[in-house]
Amino acid sequence: MKKSTAPLIHGIVAASLGLGAWAAGLPAHALEAQPATPPGYGPNPTLPEPQKGLLPTINVAKAVGWPTGVQPQPAAGLAVTRFADKLDHPRWVYVLPNGDVLVAETNAPQRPDDGKGPKAWITKQFQKKAGATVKSANRITLLRDTNGDGIADQRFVFAEGLNSPFGMALIGNTFYVANTDAVMRFPYTAGQTRLAGKPTKLANLPGGSINHHWTKSLIANAAGTKLYAGIGSNSNVAENGIENEQNRAGILEIDVQTGATRVFAAGLRNPVGLAWEPTSKALWTSVNERDELGDDLVPDYITSVQDGGFYGWPYSWYGRHVDDRVKPQRPELVEKALVPDYAVGAHTASLGLASAEGNKLTQTYASGMFIGQHGSWNRKQPAGYKVVFVPFVGAKPSGMPLDVLTGFLNEKGEAMGRPVGVAVDRQGALLVADDVGNVIWRVTASGAAGPTAAFPAATGAASTPAAQ
Protein backbone atom coordinates (compact mmCIF):
# COMPACT_ATOMS: atom_id res chain seq x y z
CA MET A 1 0.00 0.00 0.00
CA LYS A 2 1.16 3.52 -0.72
CA LYS A 3 1.95 5.60 2.28
CA SER A 4 2.10 9.37 2.47
CA THR A 5 2.79 11.89 5.21
CA ALA A 6 1.79 15.53 5.38
CA PRO A 7 1.30 18.21 8.00
CA LEU A 8 -1.94 18.02 9.89
CA ILE A 9 -3.42 20.34 12.48
CA HIS A 10 -5.28 18.55 15.29
CA GLY A 11 -7.93 16.30 13.83
CA ILE A 12 -8.76 18.22 10.63
CA VAL A 13 -9.42 15.01 8.76
CA ALA A 14 -10.57 12.62 11.45
CA ALA A 15 -13.99 14.01 12.26
CA SER A 16 -15.16 14.47 8.70
CA LEU A 17 -14.03 11.02 7.65
CA GLY A 18 -15.17 9.26 10.78
CA LEU A 19 -11.98 7.28 10.64
CA GLY A 20 -9.75 5.57 13.19
CA ALA A 21 -7.51 2.44 12.81
CA TRP A 22 -7.78 -0.79 10.98
CA ALA A 23 -6.70 -4.31 12.02
CA ALA A 24 -7.85 -7.12 9.77
CA GLY A 25 -8.14 -10.83 10.35
CA LEU A 26 -5.58 -13.43 11.19
CA PRO A 27 -6.31 -17.16 10.84
CA ALA A 28 -6.78 -18.92 14.16
CA HIS A 29 -3.76 -21.16 13.62
CA ALA A 30 -1.55 -18.11 13.02
CA LEU A 31 -2.60 -16.67 16.34
CA GLU A 32 -0.66 -19.39 18.12
CA ALA A 33 2.57 -18.01 16.68
CA GLN A 34 2.00 -14.53 18.08
CA PRO A 35 4.35 -13.82 21.00
CA ALA A 36 1.90 -11.48 22.70
CA THR A 37 -1.38 -9.69 22.26
CA PRO A 38 -0.85 -6.60 20.06
CA PRO A 39 -1.07 -3.21 21.78
CA GLY A 40 -4.47 -1.71 22.26
CA TYR A 41 -6.75 -4.75 22.44
CA GLY A 42 -8.70 -6.48 25.16
CA PRO A 43 -9.83 -5.82 28.73
CA ASN A 44 -6.29 -5.01 29.89
CA PRO A 45 -4.59 -3.55 26.82
CA THR A 46 -0.89 -2.89 26.44
CA LEU A 47 -0.44 0.88 26.16
CA PRO A 48 2.90 2.05 24.70
CA GLU A 49 4.49 5.41 25.36
CA PRO A 50 3.02 8.33 23.37
CA GLN A 51 4.81 9.21 20.14
CA LYS A 52 4.64 12.90 19.29
CA GLY A 53 5.91 14.70 16.25
CA LEU A 54 5.33 17.65 13.97
CA LEU A 55 4.29 15.42 11.08
CA PRO A 56 1.63 12.87 11.97
CA THR A 57 1.37 9.90 9.65
CA ILE A 58 -1.40 10.16 7.07
CA ASN A 59 -2.36 6.98 5.27
CA VAL A 60 -5.84 7.19 3.75
CA ALA A 61 -7.29 4.39 1.66
CA LYS A 62 -8.67 5.67 -1.63
CA ALA A 63 -12.38 4.92 -2.00
CA VAL A 64 -13.04 2.94 -5.20
CA GLY A 65 -16.24 0.96 -4.55
CA TRP A 66 -16.98 -2.71 -5.18
CA PRO A 67 -16.17 -4.28 -8.55
CA THR A 68 -18.89 -6.44 -10.06
CA GLY A 69 -19.11 -9.81 -8.33
CA VAL A 70 -16.83 -8.89 -5.41
CA GLN A 71 -17.97 -8.65 -1.81
CA PRO A 72 -16.54 -8.76 1.73
CA GLN A 73 -15.18 -11.99 3.20
CA PRO A 74 -17.27 -13.51 6.02
CA ALA A 75 -15.71 -15.54 8.81
CA ALA A 76 -15.84 -19.32 8.61
CA GLY A 77 -19.37 -20.52 9.28
CA LEU A 78 -20.93 -17.32 7.95
CA ALA A 79 -22.22 -16.08 4.60
CA VAL A 80 -22.81 -12.57 3.28
CA THR A 81 -25.24 -11.18 0.70
CA ARG A 82 -26.40 -7.77 -0.46
CA PHE A 83 -29.58 -6.82 1.35
CA ALA A 84 -29.74 -3.56 -0.61
CA ASP A 85 -27.41 -1.56 -2.83
CA LYS A 86 -27.25 1.65 -4.87
CA LEU A 87 -27.85 3.70 -1.75
CA ASP A 88 -26.44 7.19 -1.13
CA HIS A 89 -23.78 7.10 1.60
CA PRO A 90 -25.65 4.83 4.04
CA ARG A 91 -24.22 5.37 7.51
CA TRP A 92 -26.68 4.00 10.07
CA VAL A 93 -29.32 1.27 10.24
CA TYR A 94 -32.34 0.76 12.48
CA VAL A 95 -34.74 -2.19 12.48
CA LEU A 96 -38.44 -1.56 13.12
CA PRO A 97 -40.59 -4.08 15.04
CA ASN A 98 -42.27 -5.30 11.84
CA GLY A 99 -38.89 -6.07 10.25
CA ASP A 100 -38.62 -3.02 8.02
CA VAL A 101 -35.07 -1.66 7.90
CA LEU A 102 -34.40 2.07 8.05
CA VAL A 103 -31.19 3.48 6.59
CA ALA A 104 -29.86 6.97 7.27
CA GLU A 105 -28.39 8.19 3.97
CA THR A 106 -26.38 11.07 5.30
CA ASN A 107 -23.13 12.97 5.51
CA ALA A 108 -21.65 16.02 7.22
CA PRO A 109 -23.44 19.37 7.04
CA GLN A 110 -21.79 22.64 6.13
CA ARG A 111 -19.24 23.49 8.84
CA PRO A 112 -17.63 26.82 7.93
CA ASP A 113 -15.45 27.05 11.04
CA ASP A 114 -14.18 23.46 11.13
CA GLY A 115 -10.91 24.34 9.41
CA LYS A 116 -10.16 27.48 7.41
CA GLY A 117 -7.47 28.48 4.94
CA PRO A 118 -4.75 25.96 3.99
CA LYS A 119 -5.89 23.30 6.43
CA ALA A 120 -9.39 23.36 4.95
CA TRP A 121 -7.89 22.67 1.53
CA ILE A 122 -5.86 19.76 2.93
CA THR A 123 -8.96 18.37 4.61
CA LYS A 124 -10.93 18.40 1.38
CA GLN A 125 -8.21 16.53 -0.49
CA PHE A 126 -8.20 13.67 2.01
CA GLN A 127 -11.99 13.69 2.23
CA LYS A 128 -12.21 13.23 -1.51
CA LYS A 129 -9.75 10.36 -1.45
CA ALA A 130 -11.66 8.58 1.30
CA GLY A 131 -15.07 9.15 -0.30
CA ALA A 132 -16.29 11.41 2.50
CA THR A 133 -17.21 14.56 0.58
CA VAL A 134 -20.46 13.48 -1.02
CA LYS A 135 -23.34 15.85 -0.39
CA SER A 136 -25.66 14.62 2.32
CA ALA A 137 -28.87 13.10 0.97
CA ASN A 138 -30.53 14.10 4.27
CA ARG A 139 -32.85 11.15 3.89
CA ILE A 140 -34.03 8.04 5.69
CA THR A 141 -34.93 5.16 3.38
CA LEU A 142 -37.16 2.24 4.34
CA LEU A 143 -36.15 -1.19 3.00
CA ARG A 144 -38.64 -4.06 3.01
CA ASP A 145 -38.12 -7.75 2.27
CA THR A 146 -41.61 -8.94 1.34
CA ASN A 147 -40.80 -12.60 0.59
CA GLY A 148 -38.22 -13.33 3.29
CA ASP A 149 -35.37 -14.16 0.92
CA GLY A 150 -32.91 -11.81 2.63
CA ILE A 151 -33.02 -9.18 -0.12
CA ALA A 152 -34.96 -5.93 0.12
CA ASP A 153 -37.35 -5.92 -2.83
CA GLN A 154 -39.11 -2.69 -1.89
CA ARG A 155 -37.71 0.68 -0.87
CA PHE A 156 -39.45 3.89 0.11
CA VAL A 157 -38.43 7.41 1.09
CA PHE A 158 -39.36 7.29 4.77
CA ALA A 159 -38.28 10.86 5.59
CA GLU A 160 -36.42 13.56 3.69
CA GLY A 161 -35.40 17.18 4.06
CA LEU A 162 -33.59 16.34 7.29
CA ASN A 163 -30.33 17.88 8.54
CA SER A 164 -27.54 15.28 8.46
CA PRO A 165 -29.70 12.65 10.21
CA PHE A 166 -28.04 9.78 12.04
CA GLY A 167 -29.55 8.14 15.14
CA MET A 168 -33.09 6.73 15.07
CA ALA A 169 -35.46 5.35 17.71
CA LEU A 170 -39.10 4.29 17.92
CA ILE A 171 -41.13 4.60 21.13
CA GLY A 172 -44.74 3.53 20.76
CA ASN A 173 -46.27 5.57 17.96
CA THR A 174 -43.53 8.20 17.91
CA PHE A 175 -40.45 8.01 15.72
CA TYR A 176 -37.37 10.00 16.74
CA VAL A 177 -34.46 11.01 14.55
CA ALA A 178 -31.28 12.76 15.64
CA ASN A 179 -30.38 15.47 13.18
CA THR A 180 -26.95 16.98 13.62
CA ASP A 181 -28.44 19.81 15.71
CA ALA A 182 -31.71 18.52 17.19
CA VAL A 183 -33.84 15.50 18.03
CA MET A 184 -37.01 15.57 15.94
CA ARG A 185 -40.13 13.48 16.49
CA PHE A 186 -42.76 12.27 14.04
CA PRO A 187 -46.08 10.46 14.45
CA TYR A 188 -45.73 6.86 13.25
CA THR A 189 -48.15 4.05 12.44
CA ALA A 190 -46.90 0.48 12.22
CA GLY A 191 -46.25 -0.54 8.64
CA GLN A 192 -46.32 2.91 7.11
CA THR A 193 -43.69 3.54 4.47
CA ARG A 194 -43.45 7.31 4.74
CA LEU A 195 -43.69 9.67 7.68
CA ALA A 196 -46.64 11.86 6.83
CA GLY A 197 -47.15 14.01 9.91
CA LYS A 198 -45.38 17.26 10.65
CA PRO A 199 -42.29 16.81 12.82
CA THR A 200 -41.73 18.69 16.05
CA LYS A 201 -38.49 19.41 17.85
CA LEU A 202 -37.98 17.51 21.10
CA ALA A 203 -34.57 18.90 22.08
CA ASN A 204 -31.65 20.84 20.70
CA LEU A 205 -28.31 19.09 20.24
CA PRO A 206 -24.87 20.72 19.98
CA GLY A 207 -24.29 21.79 16.38
CA GLY A 208 -22.83 25.10 15.32
CA SER A 209 -20.33 26.25 12.76
CA ILE A 210 -17.50 23.96 13.95
CA ASN A 211 -19.51 20.76 14.59
CA HIS A 212 -16.31 18.73 14.37
CA HIS A 213 -18.00 15.41 15.16
CA TRP A 214 -21.34 15.88 13.45
CA THR A 215 -23.04 12.49 13.93
CA LYS A 216 -25.55 12.23 16.77
CA SER A 217 -26.53 8.70 17.77
CA LEU A 218 -29.72 7.80 19.60
CA ILE A 219 -31.18 4.97 21.70
CA ALA A 220 -34.29 4.64 23.89
CA ASN A 221 -34.51 3.02 27.31
CA ALA A 222 -36.74 -0.02 27.84
CA ALA A 223 -39.42 2.00 29.61
CA GLY A 224 -39.69 4.41 26.69
CA THR A 225 -39.26 7.42 28.96
CA LYS A 226 -35.73 8.51 28.02
CA LEU A 227 -33.56 8.88 24.96
CA TYR A 228 -29.77 8.82 25.07
CA ALA A 229 -27.78 10.77 22.49
CA GLY A 230 -24.10 10.19 21.75
CA ILE A 231 -22.38 13.53 21.08
CA GLY A 232 -18.79 13.77 19.85
CA SER A 233 -16.27 16.47 20.72
CA ASN A 234 -15.70 19.66 18.75
CA SER A 235 -11.98 18.93 18.39
CA ASN A 236 -9.19 16.42 18.83
CA VAL A 237 -8.12 17.52 22.34
CA ALA A 238 -10.01 20.77 22.99
CA GLU A 239 -7.75 22.85 20.76
CA ASN A 240 -10.80 24.86 19.64
CA GLY A 241 -11.35 25.97 23.22
CA ILE A 242 -13.06 24.16 26.07
CA GLU A 243 -15.90 26.68 25.83
CA ASN A 244 -16.83 25.06 22.51
CA GLU A 245 -17.24 21.65 24.15
CA GLN A 246 -20.37 22.36 26.17
CA ASN A 247 -22.63 19.26 26.23
CA ARG A 248 -20.20 17.50 23.89
CA ALA A 249 -17.86 14.52 24.27
CA GLY A 250 -20.48 12.61 26.20
CA ILE A 251 -23.93 11.09 26.31
CA LEU A 252 -26.99 13.24 26.94
CA GLU A 253 -30.16 11.91 28.54
CA ILE A 254 -33.37 13.40 27.10
CA ASP A 255 -36.81 13.21 28.70
CA VAL A 256 -39.27 12.24 25.94
CA GLN A 257 -42.15 14.13 27.56
CA THR A 258 -40.48 17.47 28.26
CA GLY A 259 -37.33 17.45 26.13
CA ALA A 260 -35.27 18.30 29.21
CA THR A 261 -31.65 17.19 28.85
CA ARG A 262 -28.84 16.39 31.23
CA VAL A 263 -25.33 15.03 30.88
CA PHE A 264 -25.54 11.30 31.58
CA ALA A 265 -21.80 10.65 31.08
CA ALA A 266 -18.86 12.85 30.07
CA GLY A 267 -15.24 12.59 28.94
CA LEU A 268 -16.09 10.31 25.99
CA ARG A 269 -14.38 11.85 22.95
CA ASN A 270 -16.76 10.49 20.31
CA PRO A 271 -19.32 7.98 21.62
CA VAL A 272 -21.00 6.86 18.41
CA GLY A 273 -22.46 3.39 18.87
CA LEU A 274 -24.99 2.85 21.66
CA ALA A 275 -26.40 -0.52 22.77
CA TRP A 276 -28.03 -2.14 25.80
CA GLU A 277 -26.32 -5.18 27.27
CA PRO A 278 -29.22 -7.62 27.82
CA THR A 279 -28.03 -9.33 31.02
CA SER A 280 -27.00 -6.31 33.09
CA LYS A 281 -29.33 -3.87 31.25
CA ALA A 282 -26.36 -1.47 31.19
CA LEU A 283 -25.84 1.07 28.42
CA TRP A 284 -22.71 0.46 26.34
CA THR A 285 -20.99 2.73 23.85
CA SER A 286 -18.24 2.54 21.24
CA VAL A 287 -15.82 5.46 21.50
CA ASN A 288 -13.35 6.93 19.01
CA GLU A 289 -10.38 8.19 21.00
CA ARG A 290 -7.88 10.98 20.28
CA ASP A 291 -5.21 11.24 17.59
CA GLU A 292 -1.57 12.30 17.15
CA LEU A 293 -0.02 10.20 19.92
CA GLY A 294 1.34 7.51 17.62
CA ASP A 295 0.22 4.48 15.66
CA ASP A 296 -0.77 2.50 18.76
CA LEU A 297 -2.37 5.24 20.87
CA VAL A 298 -5.00 5.84 21.89
CA PRO A 299 -7.07 2.68 21.45
CA ASP A 300 -10.72 3.08 20.61
CA TYR A 301 -12.88 1.20 23.06
CA ILE A 302 -16.26 -0.13 24.06
CA THR A 303 -17.42 0.41 27.60
CA SER A 304 -20.38 0.23 29.91
CA VAL A 305 -21.54 3.72 30.79
CA GLN A 306 -22.05 4.82 34.37
CA ASP A 307 -24.59 7.52 35.15
CA GLY A 308 -22.49 10.54 36.10
CA GLY A 309 -19.28 8.85 35.00
CA PHE A 310 -16.29 10.76 33.62
CA TYR A 311 -14.00 8.96 31.16
CA GLY A 312 -11.08 11.37 30.85
CA TRP A 313 -11.38 13.40 27.65
CA PRO A 314 -9.66 15.74 27.03
CA TYR A 315 -7.45 15.74 30.12
CA SER A 316 -6.53 12.07 30.20
CA TRP A 317 -6.80 8.95 28.07
CA TYR A 318 -7.71 5.38 28.90
CA GLY A 319 -8.27 6.17 32.51
CA ARG A 320 -5.74 8.45 34.16
CA HIS A 321 -2.98 8.73 31.54
CA VAL A 322 -2.54 12.50 31.43
CA ASP A 323 -2.54 14.22 28.02
CA ASP A 324 -0.07 17.05 28.56
CA ARG A 325 -1.13 18.76 25.33
CA VAL A 326 -4.25 20.03 27.08
CA LYS A 327 -3.89 23.34 28.93
CA PRO A 328 -4.87 24.12 31.60
CA GLN A 329 -4.89 20.70 33.20
CA ARG A 330 -7.67 19.49 35.51
CA PRO A 331 -6.07 16.98 37.90
CA GLU A 332 -9.24 16.79 39.99
CA LEU A 333 -11.09 15.43 36.94
CA VAL A 334 -8.28 13.08 35.97
CA GLU A 335 -8.51 11.59 39.45
CA LYS A 336 -12.13 10.65 38.72
CA ALA A 337 -11.52 9.22 35.25
CA LEU A 338 -12.97 5.74 34.73
CA VAL A 339 -11.04 3.05 32.86
CA PRO A 340 -12.95 1.72 29.83
CA ASP A 341 -14.01 -1.92 29.80
CA TYR A 342 -12.41 -3.10 26.55
CA ALA A 343 -9.97 -1.75 23.94
CA VAL A 344 -10.60 -2.44 20.25
CA GLY A 345 -7.41 -1.08 18.68
CA ALA A 346 -5.91 2.35 18.09
CA HIS A 347 -7.55 4.40 15.33
CA THR A 348 -9.90 1.61 14.26
CA ALA A 349 -12.79 4.10 14.10
CA SER A 350 -15.10 1.73 15.91
CA LEU A 351 -18.42 3.36 15.12
CA GLY A 352 -21.21 0.80 14.88
CA LEU A 353 -22.27 -1.18 17.97
CA ALA A 354 -24.97 -3.83 18.31
CA SER A 355 -25.76 -6.35 21.01
CA ALA A 356 -25.66 -9.98 19.92
CA GLU A 357 -29.13 -10.49 21.40
CA GLY A 358 -31.45 -12.13 18.88
CA ASN A 359 -28.81 -13.06 16.33
CA LYS A 360 -28.85 -16.52 14.73
CA LEU A 361 -25.35 -16.66 13.27
CA THR A 362 -23.61 -19.44 15.21
CA GLN A 363 -23.10 -20.22 18.89
CA THR A 364 -19.78 -18.36 18.71
CA TYR A 365 -21.74 -15.11 18.54
CA ALA A 366 -24.35 -15.95 21.20
CA SER A 367 -23.29 -13.27 23.70
CA GLY A 368 -21.33 -10.11 23.05
CA MET A 369 -21.18 -7.05 20.83
CA PHE A 370 -20.76 -6.56 17.08
CA ILE A 371 -18.63 -3.54 16.11
CA GLY A 372 -18.40 -1.76 12.76
CA GLN A 373 -14.84 -0.45 12.32
CA HIS A 374 -14.75 2.27 9.69
CA GLY A 375 -10.95 2.33 9.25
CA SER A 376 -7.86 4.41 9.94
CA TRP A 377 -6.43 7.52 8.33
CA ASN A 378 -3.34 8.19 10.47
CA ARG A 379 -1.45 4.94 10.93
CA LYS A 380 1.50 3.46 9.02
CA GLN A 381 -0.11 0.01 9.10
CA PRO A 382 -3.82 0.58 8.53
CA ALA A 383 -6.31 -0.88 10.98
CA GLY A 384 -10.06 -1.41 11.12
CA TYR A 385 -12.05 -1.66 7.88
CA LYS A 386 -14.02 -4.64 9.10
CA VAL A 387 -16.73 -5.89 11.41
CA VAL A 388 -15.60 -7.63 14.60
CA PHE A 389 -17.29 -9.40 17.48
CA VAL A 390 -16.33 -9.12 21.14
CA PRO A 391 -17.49 -12.17 23.15
CA PHE A 392 -19.11 -11.55 26.55
CA VAL A 393 -19.29 -13.79 29.60
CA GLY A 394 -21.38 -12.67 32.57
CA ALA A 395 -22.26 -9.32 30.93
CA LYS A 396 -18.57 -8.41 30.43
CA PRO A 397 -16.10 -8.82 27.53
CA SER A 398 -14.04 -12.01 27.65
CA GLY A 399 -11.15 -12.86 25.35
CA MET A 400 -9.98 -11.22 22.16
CA PRO A 401 -12.18 -9.83 19.35
CA LEU A 402 -13.12 -12.09 16.43
CA ASP A 403 -13.42 -11.12 12.79
CA VAL A 404 -16.92 -11.28 11.33
CA LEU A 405 -16.55 -9.49 7.99
CA THR A 406 -13.25 -8.48 6.37
CA GLY A 407 -11.90 -7.85 2.87
CA PHE A 408 -13.09 -4.26 2.50
CA LEU A 409 -9.72 -3.34 0.95
CA ASN A 410 -8.33 -4.57 -2.34
CA GLU A 411 -4.77 -5.70 -2.99
CA LYS A 412 -3.74 -2.08 -3.64
CA GLY A 413 -4.98 -0.99 -0.22
CA GLU A 414 -7.93 0.85 -1.74
CA ALA A 415 -11.29 0.89 0.02
CA MET A 416 -13.98 -1.00 -1.83
CA GLY A 417 -16.19 -0.42 1.16
CA ARG A 418 -16.28 0.92 4.72
CA PRO A 419 -18.45 -0.63 7.42
CA VAL A 420 -20.27 1.75 9.75
CA GLY A 421 -23.59 1.00 11.44
CA VAL A 422 -24.53 -2.55 12.47
CA ALA A 423 -27.85 -4.05 13.60
CA VAL A 424 -29.47 -7.45 14.07
CA ASP A 425 -32.60 -7.89 11.95
CA ARG A 426 -35.82 -9.69 12.91
CA GLN A 427 -34.60 -12.94 11.33
CA GLY A 428 -31.40 -12.90 13.38
CA ALA A 429 -29.05 -11.80 10.59
CA LEU A 430 -26.47 -9.04 11.02
CA LEU A 431 -26.93 -5.94 8.86
CA VAL A 432 -23.89 -3.80 8.03
CA ALA A 433 -24.06 -0.31 6.49
CA ASP A 434 -21.24 0.32 3.99
CA ASP A 435 -20.97 4.03 3.17
CA VAL A 436 -18.33 3.69 0.43
CA GLY A 437 -19.83 0.65 -1.31
CA ASN A 438 -23.33 2.13 -0.82
CA VAL A 439 -24.55 -1.30 0.26
CA ILE A 440 -26.32 -2.84 3.23
CA TRP A 441 -24.65 -6.25 3.73
CA ARG A 442 -26.51 -9.10 5.42
CA VAL A 443 -24.52 -11.72 7.33
CA THR A 444 -26.07 -15.12 8.13
CA ALA A 445 -24.94 -18.57 9.25
CA SER A 446 -23.66 -20.86 6.49
CA GLY A 447 -23.42 -24.10 8.45
CA ALA A 448 -19.62 -24.21 8.76
CA ALA A 449 -17.69 -23.39 11.94
CA GLY A 450 -14.59 -21.71 13.32
CA PRO A 451 -14.01 -18.05 14.24
CA THR A 452 -10.83 -16.15 13.39
CA ALA A 453 -8.91 -13.76 15.59
CA ALA A 454 -9.29 -10.08 14.79
CA PHE A 455 -5.70 -8.88 15.12
CA PRO A 456 -3.11 -7.72 14.42
CA ALA A 457 -3.10 -6.31 10.87
CA ALA A 458 -3.35 -8.86 8.09
CA THR A 459 -6.13 -7.82 5.75
CA GLY A 460 -8.66 -10.51 4.88
CA ALA A 461 -9.18 -10.93 1.15
CA ALA A 462 -12.44 -10.03 -0.52
CA SER A 463 -14.46 -12.82 -2.06
CA THR A 464 -16.83 -13.54 -4.90
CA PRO A 465 -20.24 -15.09 -4.23
CA ALA A 466 -19.22 -18.30 -6.01
CA ALA A 467 -16.27 -18.76 -3.67
CA GLN A 468 -18.42 -19.14 -0.56
Image (cartoon, grey):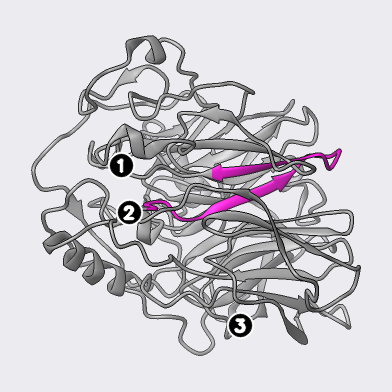
- Callouts 3 and 1 close, C-beta under 8 Å: no
Which residue is drawn at the image coordinates 57% and 86% (left, top)?
86
Q: Position of residue 59 (x, y in %)?
A: 23, 59
Report the number of numbered marks: 3
Q: Which of marks 2 and 1 is nearer the N terminus?
A: 2
Which quadrant is the N terminus positioned in? bottom left
Q: In which quarter of the image is residue 148?
A: bottom right
Q: Mark 3 — residue?
A: 85
Magenta region includes residue 335: no
Q: Distance between the residues labelled 2 and 1?
A: 8 Å
Count neighbours of disc 1 (C-alpha within 10 A) and say few if under 14, some if 14 to 19, many if 20 or more. many
Count neighbours of disc 2 (C-alpha within 10 A) and say few if under 14, some if 14 to 19, many if 20 or more. many
- Callouts 2 and 1 close, C-beta under 8 Å: yes
In the image, residue 119 sits, relative to residue 89, either above or below, namely above
In the image, residue 153 sits, relative to residue 37, either above or below, namely below
Q: Position of residue 322 (x, y in %)?
A: 29, 19
Q: Earlier in the sequence, mark 3 or mark 2?
A: 2
Count neighbours of disc 3 (C-alpha within 10 A) and say few if under 14, some if 14 to 19, many if 20 or more. some
Q: Residue 14 carries which label?
A: 2
Q: Which of marks 3 and 2 is in front?
A: 2
Left or right of 62, for residue 278 = right
